[in-house]
Amino acid sequence: MFGAVNGDMFALAVANMSDLAIVLTSADGIVRDVAFGDPGLSGQIPKLRPGTRLADHLTIESRPKLEALLAGTSEKGRWRHLNFPGEELGIDVPISMQAFGLGSGRVLVVGRDERQAAAMQRRFMAAQRDLESTFTRLRQADMRYQTLLHMSELAVLTLDGDDFTIIDINALASDYVRQGNRKLLGRKVSSILAPDDVERVEQMLRGYTASSRGGNFIAHLRNGEARRFQAAAFRFGGSPRLVLRIEQTDGEAPSPGELFQSLFARFPTAMVVTHSNLEIISANRAFVDLIQLSLEENAVGQQLERFVGERGVDTSVLRIGLLEQGTVREFASTVTTAFGEQTEVDLDAAAAGFGQEEYFLFMLHPRENARRAASAAMTTQQDESEMAERIVAGVGRLSMKEIVRDVTDRVERLCIENALRLTGNNRASAAEMLGVSRQNLYDKLRRFDIDGGRDEEESVGGS
């Protein structure tokens, strides 16, 4: 196939297809010609020139490999890894070389640049060393943790925050909750609790996990003994964890905080606690049932306006009222469930400050009171009846345009009066509720001769 190829064509092909090609005499290893297929390689070994000995350009440990390479020249030569001292940063230049006999005492040596593979190998070895070092540190840390855990005079166990599986438990905690000879690791925390307390405890644990906060509660073990639990939440490897400390109660009464948490969780009225920005911190089961969510933690972190009111108007008015007055009673609004259904509710709310933070508690009562519904219906019927009488009386006496203007004015007046009543005569909040500008509301107050109340700025300045 290649019988017609001349020497120049063969030399050109070898020079271009290899990173390095050398022709030398087999007797003394003197370089007769050299070609660099990779221009960057010539800068790394610039002294490799015709007339020099190839062995002089290699590192000491690579010279025996060159002798073996030249001695084993054949049609099926063996690749050998040779290193040339590098000109940059003292890093050797690795090249895989193979030799072919050309006859007449000449040898063709071709090479492949292995610098990229060597760099990857160095990085791999460095990463492996770092990994081994990190693993050693983690193993030592785990040994110290296990030693401290089992030497501790505190009864402690660690739970998986997703399914409340027991991950770790020390000897003292095991003594507290021991149930025969059964292994506790890998079992659910419900296996150590009295059946009547399981749902309440898991609900509180879900709240701790969702809010990344801790708390205290009292629960009964399987044997009926009451124990105080102190919970703390943390994250490990992106997964939630809970540490539970178990203490003897000695028959003492629960703290006010523990009592409130227990009652809050079981209270039949929908209740929710938020930050001052109306971000939900905690919600009881009744609230979750009202908005048709599956778990309490699905509400934690959400904005209250997602579920209460329309377009955030109601919640804005509630927030202003709580910040100014501290309490709000029987505020009419609506609740939107997770499936888009709406339910009319009355809200009672209170504000309380702790340190630099302000917190709100909301109680939502579905508007199922027949008296209120009948009263609202009666008022609506009276308004509609009076409106109809005004329209009938105006026909034939006034033009239709004048009748429409009169009805529109009356509707606007009723809307403004109700908005001022709901906002405690706060004009800024009333304008926001009605969806009009403050100046537009002022113009209508003057037009209808309505006592306009006060602005937010006036209220804040007066306080």
Image (tube, rainbow, N blue to C red):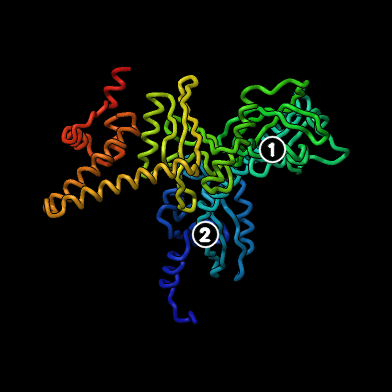
Residue 249 showing in the rendered view: yes
Give the percent coordinates (x, y) of residue 190. 74, 41
Vertical arrangement, residue 225 with respect to residue 42, above or below: above
- The answer to whether residue 6 is left or right of residue 55 is left
Q: Is residue 148 visible?
A: no
Residue assigned mark 2: 111
Residue extending farthest to the top is 463
Numbered label attached to residue 451: none
- Describe residue 283's horizontal placement relative to residue 8 as left or right: right
* Local crowd size for mark 1, using a 10 Å CA cut-off: few (<14), some (14–19), many (≥20): many
Alpha carbon of mark 2 to alpha carbon of mark 1: how far?
Answer: 60 Å
**Residue 280, position as x, y percentages in the image:** 49, 36
Q: Is residue 251 left or right of residue 25?
A: right
Report the residue at 74% width, 20% height from top: 252
SS at mark 1? strand
Q: Amino acid at mark 2?
A: Gly
Q: Position of residue 201 (x, y in %)?
A: 68, 36
86 vs 229: above or below: below
Q: Secondary structure at mark 2?
A: strand
* Along the viewing direction, whichever of 126 and 166 lies nearer the viewer: 166
Identify which amino acid the numbered label 1 is placed on: Leu
Residue at the (16%, 50%) spot, across then down: 394
Q: Quadrant of residue 249?
A: top right
User: Any mark on residue 159, and which?
Assistant: 1
Q: Residue at x 83, y 34 (%)?
A: 223
Task: Give the residue displayed 41% in from the left and 71% down from the top.
Answer: 8
